Amino acid sequence: MARPLSTFTCTITPFGPDGSLDCDAWRAHVDRLASVGMGVYVGSSSPGEGCALTAEETELVYGIAADTAAGRVSARAMGVETRTAAEYLELVAIAEAVGLEAMQVYCVDVGHANTPTPGELEAYFRTVLEGSSIPCVLSSHIFNGYVIPLDLVGRLVQEYAPDKIIGINVTNTDMGYVTRVVDVVDGRCDVHVGGPMQALTILALGGQGFLSGEGNIIPATCRQVITAHLSGDFAASQVAYAQVMRLFSANRWPGGSVRFLKAVMACAGLPGHYLRPPFAPVEADIAAEIETALAHLDIPELADLLAR
């Protein structure tokens, strides 16, 4: 039996002009995503600025998302890169306490450009999985500087799926690795790709969908990539995909997604578009370039936002 398809937004975290957490904007943001059937991953490193949140703020962000999305869409904690399994289990405990559906588990960041050995990485994942009562989604993200070895993916999925491991999020430009992850998983849990670039490819490979930051701006369009595909309207799915990729490709400035996404939010008049240090907003000339570029993207959902 085929696993259901889905898409998730890696959410921003709304702040006010003084850098404080904007809980009202956060409720409105999660509600907007849930209203179009968009699943949410919350409190991420990027674009969620999760590393800048205190433990108390993390609990607020997780809890509001759980309450606002409840019964409508899947709300999951994305977590941030930590140095040890014990640190990650502190985030897991928050997600469990507020009732989020699942917890993504990033690879461990041992610091100073070091890479854990396969044995160390396996011990880390097993410690987190054994210490969690909430279902988990493994993350193999190339921006961590390394990926989960395929044989380790196989062992963990064999032992812990589908009860404890319900998915794996793969962010990697190497489509050979992505393809082999799908093959190793062999339908025992979900496989999503990070970013919209491979959204249609992962569906062709037998995966379940994609994550994106663009869903913060055009959630209905991102969702349409999946819903049109499910209905067999592949032309409509491709149109939606092209629109998502136009917004993705409009970010021509290096340094991560959150500065660009919040600049777009400011242009669209969406609340919570302020950043928290160490991030700073894009310069005025870049903001003007972004505003000009957005007006020519031919994305109806974005055009409606800009018109308002």
Image (cartoon, rainbow, N blue to C red):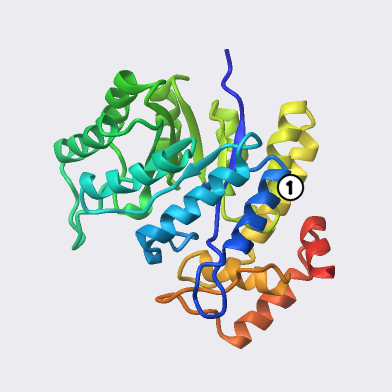
Screen quadrant of the C terminus? bottom right
Closer to us: 206 or 168? 168
Name the side, left or right, on which 64 lies relative to 150.
right
Position above or below: 144 against 185: below
Q: Give the structural element (helix, strand or loop) at label 1.
A: helix
Location of residue 204 in the rendering, given as x and y in whole percent from the top left corner = 60, 29
Q: Give residue 265's quadrant in the image.
A: bottom right
State how many labels appear: 1
Residue at 68 percent across and 82 percent down: it is 288
Location of residue 138 in the rendering, given as x and y in whole percent from the top left corner = 37, 37
Position above or below: 191 against 280: above
Position above or below: 216 against 125: below
Screen quadrant of the N terminus? top right
Closer to us: 58 or 108? 58
Q: Is residue 45 visible?
A: no
Q: Give residue 70's quadrant in the image.
A: top right
Name the side, left or right, on which 205 lies relative to 81.
right
Location of residue 100 in the rendering, given as x and y in whole percent from the top left corner = 48, 39
Q: Can residue 90 be seen in this view?
A: yes
Q: Which amino acid does label 1 sit on?
A: Ala
Residue at 74 percent across and 46 percent down: it is 240
Q: Name the residue under label 1.
A: 220
Location of residue 52 in the rendering, given as x and y in whole percent from the top left corner = 39, 66
Name the side, left or right, on which 161 lies relative to 39.
left
Residue furthest top in the image: 1
Residue at 64 percent across and 52 percent down: it is 215
Residue at 21 percent across and 60 percent down: it is 113
